[in-house]
Image (cartoon, helix red, strand yellow):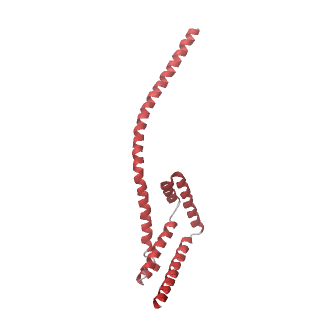
Amino acid sequence: MLKKKGKDMYKSSASYMSKKGDAIMSRQDDLKTKTVNAKWFEKVATYGKNFKLAGLAASIASIGVNGYYNLPDDRVKRDYNEGKAVRASTKVVVGTIIDSAENFGVIDGGVSGAMVGGVPGAIGLGALGAANQTAQFFFPKGYKKAKNVAFKSIDYIADKATKIGRVSQSR
């Protein structure tokens, strides 16, 4: 009886080992497939450097679009028509900065932060973008008011500089 139990145990363990061996062999085939996929991911990672450049190009293009949309502003047009090119150009640059800050959101922060500082950068700038959008929810005209104050400040400083220039020329 002991012999029979021993044989049964041997058969069951051999059967178990055979099944495990088959499972290991099929996993090796899976491993080969995964290795091929890993090489594909390696290529994607290599091209990831180019994606960073694409993100930078998209950011620059966004800033360019914001600058373009500041040109038709009546306050800027008026200054250009009056021959005050420096004042008008300053308004375009300041208006572009303010508009770019207004458009900065969670996704912009996350992507920019990931490009600059990895995961911590993505979390930090993503939170900053979320705070910016939350502030805009509570103060929807905040950036418009900031732009008006900035343009008035530019006009004030330019007028004072013009007066100083006239006074010093008359002496």
Locate residue 171, reporting x and y percent: 47, 91
| Image-based side of 120 in relation to 42, left or right | right
Looking at the figure, which quarter contains the N terminus? top right
Q: Residue furthest bottom?
A: 170
Give the side of residue 40 with respect to residue 150, left or right: left
Residue 7 in picture, x, y percent from top left: 53, 12
- The x and y percentages for residue 2 are 58, 9
Residue extending farthest front: 171
Which of the 4 image quadrants contains residue 70? Answer: bottom left
What residue is drawn where x is 40% and y is 41%?
Answer: 39
**Which is nearer the eye, 42 or 29?**
42
Question: At 49% from the left edge and 83% from the top edge, which residue is drawn?
Answer: 161
Quadrant location of residue 169? bottom left
Q: Which residue is at 53% across, 19% downward?
A: 13
Residue 143 % position (x, y)? 54, 71
Count the numbered circles shown. 0
